[in-house]
Image (cartoon, grey):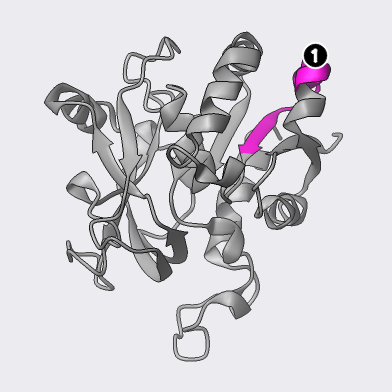
Amino acid sequence: MASVRALILRTAGTNCDMETGHAFALAGAKPELIHINALIKEKSVLREFRILALPGGFSYGDDIASGKILANELVNTLRDEIRDFVRRGGLVIGICNGFQVLVKMGLLPDTSGNISGEVEATLALNDSGRFESRWVYLKKCVKGKKECVWTKGLPDVIHIPVAHGEGKFIPRDRKVLSDLNDNGQIVFRYVDKSGAEGGYPHNPNGSIEDIAGVSDPGGKILGLMPHPERNFTFLQDPNWFRSQKIIKDAGVGLQIFKNGVNFFK
């Protein structure tokens, strides 16, 4: 079977596109870094890909709010194409700034599952009032039939880095939060090393219910604040020489990218 093609979307201020592309390549995909201007010029190009990735960075300097300008640009220029991409079975992942974009353009959490584009949440300034950059622990929240495509085979607790100033996930209202829980859309929560609720600094931003990542109801669109592309080899984990649980080959983050690729194989 031909390699699964992954479109890594970039624009001014994106700075994790090459790492994200490299992670997809290691996972067996054929990644292509495409600037948003090129995609707007040739919108039909999106049909040639199976995976759309919005990587981390500071798109357009995060003026106004993190990811807001890029979110507006995608809504105003590529909304129909992205909806069509999702409806045809394409997978989407947004990491850090990419997660902020997906939320602010209404593609996540989409609790109704009808790709309405309704904005149901936001990612706000960290409670600490500063940029948080360090390794954290995440707990996988959903298993079995409702499990997100991107999380299959992951351990219950994973170690992964964060680097953001606006990562506090806030649902629009209590109903959205309730729907997220009922639908199994909360994919990751920040926890301490043991997997228990830990508060700050384990939750680096004050996210409601320690939410670190969510999916759409179908589990094909994933958004998360931590950076799996920064843990694709065990050598990137600061604890690799202390832990007997580290698999001395791939980092735990690589499994996320492999899941996206293997979905089509």
Which one is nearer the viewer's eye here, 132 or 213? 132
Query: Which amino acid, mark 1?
Result: Ser
Taking 142 as reference, is 217 above or below it?
above
Q: Position of residue 49 (x, y in %)?
A: 76, 27
Query: Which element is circle 1 on?
Result: helix
Q: Which residue in the structure is indicated by mark 1?
A: 44
Along the horizontal axis of the image, is 180 left or right of 156?
left
Residues drawn in magenta: 40-53
Magenta highlight on residue 49: yes
Along the horizontal axis of the image, is 211 left or right of 64?
left
Q: Residue at x 24, y 32 (%)?
A: 171
Residue 88 seen in this snapshot: no
Residue at far right of view: 2
Q: Position of residue 35 (x, y in %)?
A: 77, 35
Magenta highlight on residue 209: no
> Within the image, what quadrant is residue 193 found in?
bottom left
Taking 221 as reference, is 235 above or below it?
below
Q: Position of residue 7 (x, y in %)?
A: 74, 35
Which one is nearer the viewer's eye here, 160 or 142? 160
Residue 191 seen in this snapshot: yes
Q: How many marks?
A: 1
Along the horizontal axis of the image, is 96 left or right of 232?
left
Along the horizontal axis of the image, is 78 left or right of 145?
right
Q: Residue at x 37, y 20 (%)?
A: 110
